[in-house]
Image (cartoon, rainbow, N blue to C red):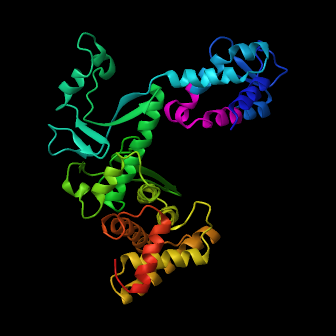
Amino acid sequence: MNLLAIVNEIIELAETDNFLGRTDVSLAFFYGGGNPLYFFANENIIKYRDALSRAFDSDEEIKRTYTLNKYESLLQEHFRECFSKKCLAKNEDVSSFVEKLKAESIKTFSVFRDIHGIVLNSPTSPLLLGGYTIYEFASQKEFFESIFDSKTDSFLEIWGNDNPEYLIEWKAEARDCEKAIEIADEHFERFELILRYVLGSATNRFEVGVLNYQGWRHRKAYILSVGEVSNSWTRHGPREPIPLDDPYLVKEDTGYHTVWSFTTKKNLNKFQKRIMLAVEWIGQSIADPSPQSAFIKAAIALEIIFTYNERDIITPSIMNQISESIALILGSSVDEILKLESSVKKLYGLRSKIVHSGHKNISQADYKTLVEIARSVIIKILTSDKLNCVDSVEELYTILKKIKYSGDAI
């Protein structure tokens, strides 16, 4: 991707004259330091946004360490003279821009957010779950005070009179504070999904949330009919906090410990990345109140594991391949393998009905079966000596083919 060409595309789109107050033009303007940039007509604004996005995507290191908004501001500032004089940038201008951005050191930011719906049985020490650290604020208040300068009121400025009950921390590497928050929030979303996957089924008993927490509440309805007025209310939401330091959540024989450990690794192989994506889709499925949508998300989790690439269309032959693979992984005898394969094919028939004809009659039993199959496949892959070192879909299918013709069980 040629950054010079993209920058010059932006320069040619932008105007710097002051058009405020005029009613005969359609424009938008953006502040990047100094005078604002103007873009006439919606089509030019769309072109600008597209060009800016392509410029941002042109360097993975910069994209990984700056937010798009910060990048936009720095780009407009660096090429301000080109914008004002309407002159095209040169190679050395673009090179100096990239060098300037990369000269800023990458820092490690500790990002904390409130976490709701939990309790720690042993709160005096922080709880480590993979790359996440969870604190009971009251027990760890001295620690939080110590990481701020004791000579200032910075602790009070940050926390004020708020005393959060529990905090979760993610350490993010970035050049920009806002990027650190963006990175951490992606991981906090992942935390919620991993925990739902580990819990395994939708329940009103627990709800743990960092960014997506609804909590305990009343649902009210008001009913009117001829000669009658009434109302109804029900309680909705978690009834109790989940003990987050319960050993069950990190059991090794279920692969939960491995899933949490994946959050700390920067060099996951391609298949491990697929496993984590599948875990997140199962988490989304469990959280989804729509039976049809939840069912599809559980099916997607399996397709992430078993399809060769993201462009594959789920044809009948691919469905058969997925069904057979699941049966080979989970079945311990020929009869069990055949039964499992038939069951998965039936469930995938429902998937096709939802996608192609809007089928809505999904039973809780069918949905729960599909979710449990998806979870069981991941657990078996992570805990089986034959499968836990797989690094690609191709290798997985090679192993399954040998198992199929040898008659051995995993």
Q: Main secondary structure of the magenta part?
A: helix
Assess whether residue 56 is covered by the magenta stretch.
Answer: yes
Q: Is residue 63 left or right of residue 84?
A: left
Q: Position of residue 393 (x, y in %)?
A: 49, 65
Region rendered in magenta: 49-70
Q: Position of residue 366 (x, y in %)?
A: 44, 74
Q: Where on the picture, by quarter, is residue 313?
A: bottom right
268 relative to 309, above or below: above
Name the quadrant of the N terminus.
top right
Q: Is residue 285 left or right of residue 59?
A: left
Q: Is residue 104 left or right of residue 90?
A: left
Q: Position of residue 289 (x, y in %)?
A: 46, 58
Closer-to-camera residue (130/169): 130
Closer-to-camera residue (207/312): 312
Whether residue 404 is visible: yes
Q: Position of residue 33 (x, y in %)?
A: 62, 14
Q: Residue drawn at (44%, 27%), measured in percent from left and top?
A: 106
Whether residue 236 is visible: no
Q: Residue drawn at (43%, 80%), measured in percent from left and top?
A: 402
